Amino acid sequence: MSTAQPHRHPQAADDPSSDYEPLERAIRELLIEKGILNAAAIQRRIEVMDSLTPANGARLVARAWTDPDFKARLMADAAGVLAEEGYELEHSPTVRVVENTSHVHNIIVCTLCSCYPRMVLGLPPAWYKKKAYRARVVREPRAVLAEFGTELPEDMEVRVHDSTADIRYIVLPCRPEDTDDMDEDALAALVTRDALIGTAPARAPRDR
């Protein structure tokens, strides 16, 4: 099974946000100038995005761990379940939940840009958008996982899932041991953003 150590995120000097900031600023100012948007509407949207956190995904995982029927529906029709739970998925992409097991470990990447299920995971971390992660995790996923402190057995299969504009992935991590007496709120506290991406396992109860 995977073990969690202090994170050593993949090294990269590139910062994709710096490349697009001038373009974003110019487009934003043009839309405001043309009256298509206004500053208040943009600010409200920013506030909505900032309010989204991985806690949403963590609650879904905790419920899946404790409710077999919910888990089955989530695995079969994640987008439908998310809609029922009130999550608005931009551009209506397909959503798939991939489950970690004792034999398979899943990890998510977007090799083209940074597609990400923001409504349930919040904003993507900076390293998720960097070229170093996007390129290396496909070629050498075990090495990248090791940099996050996640060491996997040699006989465990690692599956890399590439998100696109049309599909988003969410990892359902393995439920930690010694959690049978924990309720959903306590279980959700064990599920980190990195566990939902697949770069780390869920926390053990002693690590909270």
Image: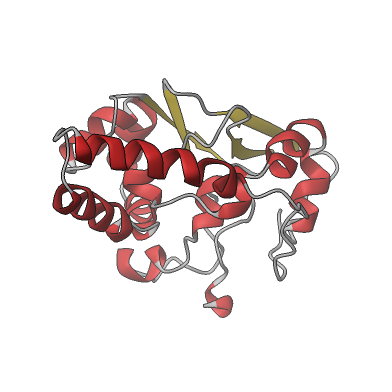
For the rendered model, the colour scheme is secondary structure
**Picture quadrant where residue 200 is located:** bottom right
Residue at 63% x, 52% y is: 127
Residue 38: x and y in percent read 16, 45
Q: Please, which residue is most extreme toward the front here?
A: 33
Residue 191: x and y in percent read 47, 60
Residue 107: x and y in percent read 62, 40
Q: Nearer the viewer, residue 113 or 88?
A: 113
Residue at 70% x, 39% y is: 131
Say left or right for 2 vs 106.
right
Say left or right for 4 vs 53.
right
Q: Nearer the viewer, residue 65 or 108?
A: 108
Residue 42: x and y in percent read 22, 48
Q: How many marks?
A: 0
Is residue 162 something one can see in this rendering?
Answer: yes
Is residue 88 something one can see in this rendering?
Answer: no
> Measured along the vertical axis of the image, is residue 7 above or below residue 128?
below
Q: Nearer the viewer, residue 203 or 121?
A: 121
